[in-house]
Image (cartoon, rainbow, N blue to C red):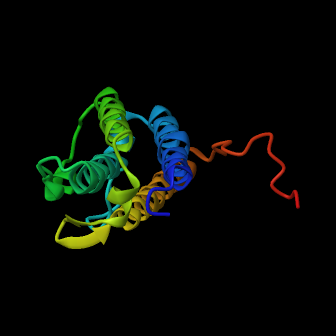
């Protein structure tokens, strides 16, 4: 496996699919359904707004992928992702998602099997590249689920993510 191009292609393909084929489009769909006031609404002091979660996801991916695997300078200001109260516009949040995806794709294009098997320092943790990818995909999905739940509860709508797919198929 040390230099297995098939392994590398499969794990990168799956990471891209989960982040950029599912996660980002779902966030975009959610943002499009919300008003700017709803994007920055916090139900209480212990909760984050959708806007905060979008900023947090962009910061997390940039830090873990860009810094951890891409060896870029770590400029993340994590606390600012949560203290922001907006209103950054919906267009600005969508732009930040697109920019994060573009930056991450550039790092993904450079990743080697050795990068995945090597330990990297990120956010005070020591993780191998596979652990970094799993963390980012899992973390992204977790917060996308929170945003989807918020939109569904506010708009009483089915997001239609699986429209036309028989989820009862065996």
Nearer the observer, 16 or 7 = 7
Q: Which residue lies furthest to the front in this view?
A: 3
Q: In this view, does 60 lie to the left or right of 10?
A: left
Q: Is residue 40 left or right of residue 12?
A: left
Image x and y of residue 30, in percent: 49, 40
Image x and y of residue 116, in percent: 37, 60
The residue at 24%/57% (across/down) is: 68
Image x and y of residue 131, in percent: 39, 67
Q: Quadrant of residue 51?
A: top left
Q: How many labels does the image show?
A: 0
Compared with 124, 19 (above or below) is: above
The residue at 40%/56% (across/down) is: 113
Nearer the observer, 120 or 90 = 120
The quarter in which the C terminus is drawn is bottom right
Compared with 28, 146 (above or below) is: below
Nearer the observer, 105 or 96 = 105
Q: Which residue lies furthest to the top in this view?
A: 91
Q: In which quarter of the image is residue 160?
A: top right
The residue at 50%/55% (across/down) is: 4
Image x and y of residue 135, in percent: 39, 64
Q: Is residue 13 left or right of residue 61?
A: right
């Amino acid at each position: 496996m040390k230099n297995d191009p098939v392994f590398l292609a499969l794990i990168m393909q799956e990471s891209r699919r989960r982040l950029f084929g599912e996660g980002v489009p779902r966030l975009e769909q959610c943002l499009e359904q919300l008003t700017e006031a709803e994007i920055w609404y916090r139900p209480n002091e212990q909760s984050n707004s959708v806007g905060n979660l979008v900023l947090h996801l962009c910061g997390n991916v940039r830090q873990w992928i860009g810094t951890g695997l891409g060896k870029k300078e770590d400029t993340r200001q994590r606390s600012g992702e949560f203290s922001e109260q907006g209103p950054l516009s919906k267009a600005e949040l969508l732009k930040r998602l697109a920019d994060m995806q573009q930056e991450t794709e550039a790092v993904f294009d450079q990743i080697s099997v050795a990068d995945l098997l090597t330990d990297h320092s990120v956010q005070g943790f020591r993780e191998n590249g596979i652990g970094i990818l799993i963390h980012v995909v899992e973390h992204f999905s977790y917060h996308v689920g929170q945003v989807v739940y918020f939109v569904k509860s506010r708009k009483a709508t089915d997001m239609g993510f699986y429209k036309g797919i028989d989820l009862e198929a065996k």
